[in-house]
């Protein structure tokens, strides 16, 4: 039961501290849509997605009105498309465009799942599929893509890593007139999860039910406000405050997730606890770290503060939900977090520091703009580094890098909305081509052999 204080507290969180349900994401299996031709498959895909998710926007709006909690995004994730188009991979863009059309028909903001799982090796149909990603992202508006290139169990597929370096460059080139937004809708993963509700990396895993509702909660502003009440507390008290706050945030998400699943005739999947920032002032993960005592995020102590935050969020949230999943922790996308943007503009945060922070945060090098003349092999090396952190530490890591074609350090890219803006950050000018061109696989670590 909710007490009067609970209700008043939640109202304050919504009105003053940016509490929201960041996304309701419906996962839909496309396996029943496979037909003999790409054209037939694309039509079945469009029809199924529109049928299954026809009420997602209306349901979210109704729930938001009834509970008084903003539900910012309504999204859909689908079975990795490379599995659906394996018999005609060169025609995969037909299915991609059908999915984008379905997203527009439904009125959702993003649809994820133009994806491939190549963490151990790359089948020929997957190689062809991955090559279609730049074209598809350049000719669609709401479709997102991802590729899983490694895992703790399988190691890292360096052929796929090299290929993705080229794909990021091509996606940026084809959308140069929009600051390379094609690359912003593409994620390279290690240890990708099947129930992630957040874009651009969401896809519907083959181990999931036909239709599932996953919810991502978010409240960086709520956590920051809570810490402002204890400015002189020691770090043990700080962790306890974050745990209590995460519990309250997640409880709201659990309530909305279960009710949304019921109304949409789908299974309740998971609540993702991730603190996901926006470019709005007061809705920043970086500012939480600064409230802990870091003068500017990126300074010494940042990784320690982020580790405390991430762990406390998980401990508090897991007690408030019967099903916690997704990525669950703290996102640090540069372009989507006003504190990260400011730190990058003054040079306080670097790619090296962001890579170190990856060891303890939810994902990794996320929404980072780099000079447009950065070689594809350097981008591939960045992906390899992040994948190695994920593989060794048995956690999900990811790269969403935006080569800003025609731009250099000191300039910026701007996408508007939740994708925000990002100052172009310098990269090391050392040549990484030799290690990338070796190919092969980086073997799985010794601790992966558990049975």
Image (cartoon, rainbow, N blue to C red):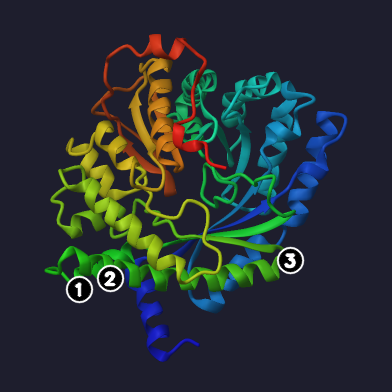
Q: What is the crowding at mark 2: few (fewer than 14 residues within 10 Å), some, or many (at least 20)? A: many
> Which element type, helix, strand or loop, lies under badge 1?
loop
Nearer-N-terminus badge (3/2): 2
Which dot marks residue 267? none
Quick one: which residue is furthest to the front in this view?
A: 451
**Marking on residue 241:** 2
Q: Which residue is mark 1?
A: 229
Q: Position of residue 165 (x, y in %)?
A: 47, 21
Choose between 161 and 419: the one closer to the eye.
Answer: 161
Assess whether mark 3 and mark 1 are in contact (beta carbons under 8 angstroms). Answer: no
Q: Are marks 1 and 2 in contact (CB under 8 Å)?
A: yes
Inter-mark Cα distance, 3 to 2 = 37 Å
Left or right: residue 273 versus residue 336 is: right
Q: Is residue 68 left or right of residue 128?
A: left
Q: Is residue 208 above or below residue 448?
A: below
Q: Can you identify the residue that label 3 sits on? A: 265
Front-most of 248 and 9?
A: 248
The image quarter in which residue 11 lies: bottom left
Quadrant for the C terminus, please: top right
């Amino acid at each position: 039961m909710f007490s009067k204080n609970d209700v008043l507290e939640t109202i304050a969180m919504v009105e003053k501290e940016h509490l929201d349900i960041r996304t309701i994401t419906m996962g839909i299996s496309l396996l029943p849509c496979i037909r003999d031709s790409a054209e037939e498959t694309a039509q079945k895909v469009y029809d199924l997605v529109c049928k299954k998710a026809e009420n997602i926007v209306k349901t979210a709006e109704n729930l938001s009105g009834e509970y008084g909690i903003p539900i910012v995004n309504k999204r859909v994730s689908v079975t990795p498309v490379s599995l659906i188009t394996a018999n005609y991979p060169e025609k995969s863009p037909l299915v991609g465009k059908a999915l984008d059309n379905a997203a527009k028909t439904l009125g959702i903001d993003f649809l994820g799942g133009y994806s491939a799982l190549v963490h151990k090796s790359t089948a020929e149909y997957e190689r062809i599929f991955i090559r279609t990603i730049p074209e598809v992202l350049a000719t669609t508006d709401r479709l997102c893509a991802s590729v899983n290139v490694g895992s703790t169990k399988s190691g890292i597929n360096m052929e796929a890593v090299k290929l993705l370096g080229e794909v990021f460059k091509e996606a940026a080139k084809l959308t140069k007139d929009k600051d390379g937004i094609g690359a912003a809708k593409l994620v390279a993963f290690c240890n990708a999860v099947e129930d992630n509700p957040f874009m651009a990396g969401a896809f519907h895993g083959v181990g999931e039910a036909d239709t599932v509702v996953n919810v991502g909660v978010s409240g960086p502003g709520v956590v920051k406000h809570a810490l402002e009440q204890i400015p002189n507390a020691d770090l043990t008290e700080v962790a306890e405050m974050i745990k209590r706050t995460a519990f309250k945030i997640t409880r709201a998400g659990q309530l909305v997730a279960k009710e949304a699943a019921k109304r949409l005739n789908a299974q309740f999947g998971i609540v993702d606890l991730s603190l996901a920032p926006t470019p709005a002032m007061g809705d920043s993960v970086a500012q939480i770290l600064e409230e802990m005592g870091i003068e500017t995020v990126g300074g010494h102590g940042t990784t320690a503060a982020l580790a405390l935050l991430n762990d406390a969020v998980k401990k508090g949230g897991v007690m408030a939900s019967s099903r916690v999943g997704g990525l669950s922790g703290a996102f640090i996308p540069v372009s989507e977090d006003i504190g990260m943007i400011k730190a990058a503009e003054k040079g306080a945060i670097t790619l090296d520091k962001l890579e170190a922070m990856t060891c303890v945060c939810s994902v990794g090098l996320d929404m980072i703009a780099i000079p447009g003349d950065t070689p594809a092999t350097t981008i591939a090396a960045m992906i390899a580094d992040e994948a190695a952190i994920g593989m060794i530490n048995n956690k999900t890591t990811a790269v969403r890098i935006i080569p800003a074609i025609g731009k250099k350090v000191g300039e910026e890219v701007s996408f508007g909305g939740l994708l925000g803006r990002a100052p172009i950050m310098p990269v090391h000018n050392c040549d990484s081509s030799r290690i990338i061109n070796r190919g092969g696989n980086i073997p799985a670590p010794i601790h992966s052999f558990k049975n």
